[in-house]
Amino acid sequence: MGNNLFPGTCLRRGLSIPFWRDERVLRVLGQIIFLIVVVGFFYYIYNNMITALAAQGMTPSFAFLSNTAGFDIGEQLIEYVRSDSYGRAILVGLLNTVYVSIIGIFFSTIFGVILGVARLSKNFLVAKLSSIYLEILRNIPLLVLLVFWYGGVFISLPRVKESIVIGSVYLSNRGVAVPWGIPTETWSTYLVILGAGLVAAIIVAWRLKIVGERTGRPPLTILWVTLTFLGTGLLGWLVLPNPPLILDYPELSGLNFSGGHVFSPEFMALLSGLVIYTAAFIGEIVRAGIQSVSKGQTEAAKALGLTGFQTLRMVIFPQAMRVIVPPLTSQYLNLTKNSSLAVAIGYPDLFSVGGTAHNQSGRAVEVIALMMGIYLSTSLLTSLFMNWYNEKIKLVER
Amino acid sequence: MTTDTKVIAPPTERYTILGWLKRNLFGSIPDSILTIFAIWLTYAMLKPAFAWIFGEARWEVIPDNLKLFMVGRYPAEYLWRIWLVLYLLVALVGFVWGVWVKKKETTGYVLLGIPIFLALLPFSMQIRLQILLLDVIGYMLYMFGRGENPSYKRWAIIAMLAYFPIAIFIIHGFGETGIMAKVEPNLWGGLLLTILLALLGIIFSFPIGVALALGRQSKLPIVSWICIGSIELVRGVPLITILFMMDLMLPLFLPAEIRIESVIRALVGITFFSAAYMAENIRGGLQAIPNGQREAAHALGLSAFHTMAFIILPQALRAVIPILVSQFIGLLKDTTLVMILSLFDVLGIGKAVLGNPDYIGTTKEVYLFVAALFWVISYGMSYASQRLETALGVGER
């Protein structure tokens, strides 16, 4: 038996293992039983649910999505009135979630990188301040932070008439009013020019990559691409007969602002809470990433005659990124998922709108399934993208 | 020996205040600018903060509602049961400390200092005495546990395992009347509810997490797909949607005869949520076990089940223990979300207190207090667990 290369078979005929002791059969059988148990459990639950719903005179169906919603939504990125359908209301909520998540990710990345670098600073005071910040923020629940920002800060700001003015930014309990660009008739032409700039930037990136591969010198791709894009944008701005955007300053008129753009207190509280909280975690990730690059790397780069900036760009940064990207991805996902806490402060994100839709329509099962499906696919999409990016920088590295 | 030894000046500046300042704060011009900016920022933020904390803030809202913050609507006549649970806790901590940690005296004194510090806060005299009694009991059990008796270690383990069921039993009670009358979970609130939800969540999610982690590693495709699917499903959605689902749909899932309280529904949601993350942590532990262990077990003739139960899992779980503490802290923070389901955890109580017309305009005070409470607990726990890990060498072998 010792030489038997094929488990489950026997060398001598007539002594074959009976099927109830054959591992291959057992594995298949075990899995079938497991599947039956799981499916049976879910069927039991589903059956209970259908019975309970039938007792309330309902059958699960998504047809209600086209019914009239009949509730208002505080802020929206697309046109929405209360006579629109539930489906559109949920779309408005989803867009709000995406909006606050993207802005939140942008700012928390910047803030987090600053914190992480500051924590490693040689300057004693800066390093200490940054580590105190991280220790405080990482040990407080986000929800507490959100309700504090909302109830304690943004709602407690003075009334519109006595609003705090910083430059042309007005802080009041009705929100934060900032100057905002208003498109003029040349705006659409300008968008075309920006598109051309984008194309030019991509071409530049492509050319630089080829040149880099030929000469073996890594080009400053990001710098040149940004310069190309900004240059085209600036050129377009100057060439057009009148500027495509004019700045509109907020002004006090009566009990409210006119002009500019007003960010609601809910949005500001949610955004600042998310940014401040997530930045603390990103700061730790960035610090760990930078520290993960061994000192020998810096010394070797110096010995090769690289300048400080070159060391950072070509030696430290690519290696740190490999450590940083996976946890950073999960922080971005966390931020997106955490934006559902908006419901506690009344910002109409996906979860909050979904909750209202459930209250109005009584369709718990469908609304929950829809929300979970949307969050799940957002998460999966983000992690797919980040995995792709992670693979890419890995390839660049080795 | 005649040599002109050059006497090199000792690096004095390293040891003087000025030298330290120069090295750490004013090394170069950009450094100095940064330092000045940091000082200005600190001053600009701390000055109004201190002015507010010691001047305008109306802190009386906290002592007035302290009972609510701590235990919610738990009946006042049964409060002694909570105290009893606390006394048992310090007795347990003191005993375990005495049995195992013996030499870490400074940290022990810090632990003893916490109740003394709390007793200095403006509570009523009775509460102060009760708090100080915590110290007395803890210290007595510590001295007792230091005694050289080999059977103490076994007792300490039994006490640790038994503590939690006993505590829940004392808090919940039994029967309709008498001193141990039942207190329904819906009456539990405040910090008590927060801590119980997190603790029960971790405890219940542990076996589920182990099962999911093993299932995910399984070579049987259907089992591993189902486990991966459920783990990723839970990890891909926000906790609040899971809580919301349990709150609304658990009654639908179960047969109509069974009614469950909202606290239990929230607990089920928290357990499922925690189990998915637990499974990932345990998987990390499983993957950290070198393959040689598995091969050695096979060579010894152990079956797959025995290999898992006696070789792989014990090592994996030991490696995972430190991570469980940080998961517990995370869960403790996440339990605040039950406020959205209108349960009265610490944050929910805070919101309810703010609804009282007497305390309008104390938003900052209440939420700062809640934040401070969470900060002290989570920071204290992560600090203590780090110290204990290094002291006991948990997770290292």
Image (cartoon, helix red, strand yellow):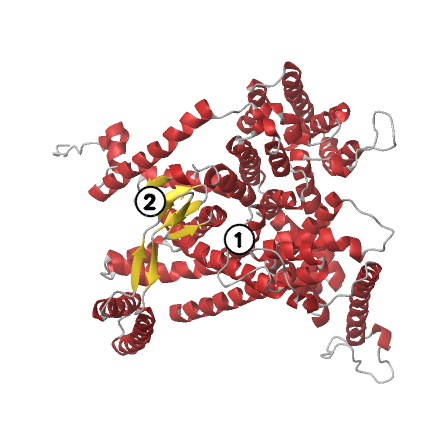
Q: Is residue A372 above or below residue B189?
A: below
Residue at mark 2? A121
Q: Relative to B14, is B123 on the left or the right? A: right
Image coordinates of residue A166 in percent, x first then y, are 32, 42
Image coordinates of residue A315 in percent, x first then y, are 33, 61
What amino acid type is highlighted by mark number 2? Ser
The span from disc 2 to disc 1 (Cα, nearest Å) is: 43 Å
Q: Residue furthest bottom?
A: A13
Image coordinates of residue B368 in percent, x first then y, are 52, 33
For label 1, the crowd category at 10 Å Cα-Cα, with few meaning under 14, some 14 to 19 and many 20 or more, is few
What amino acid type is highlighted by mark number 1? Gly
Q: Is residue B305 above or below residue B204?
A: below
Tell me if I can see residue A291 in this picture: no
- The residue nearer to you, when weighing A89 against A139, is A89
Q: Nearer the viewer, mark 2 or mark 1?
A: 1
- The residue nearer to you, when weighing B147 against A34, is A34
Label 2 chain ID: A
Q: Relative to A248, is B72 on the left or the right? A: right
Residue at mark 1? A74
Residue A107's disc is: none
Label 1 chain ID: A
Secondary structure found at label 1: loop
Q: Are marks 2 and 1 on the same chain?
A: yes
Image coordinates of residue B143 in percent, x first then y, are 66, 22
Q: Residue furthest top?
A: B125
Tally of numbered tags: 2
For label 2, the crowd category at 10 Å Cα-Cα, with few meaning under 14, some 14 to 19 and many 20 or more, is some
Q: Quadrant of the N terminus of chain B?
A: top left
Q: Residue at x 65, y 68 (%)?
A: A66
Chain-order first, disc 2 or disc 1: 1
Q: Is residue A323 above or below residue B195?
A: below
Q: Relative to A110, is B140 on the left or the right? A: right
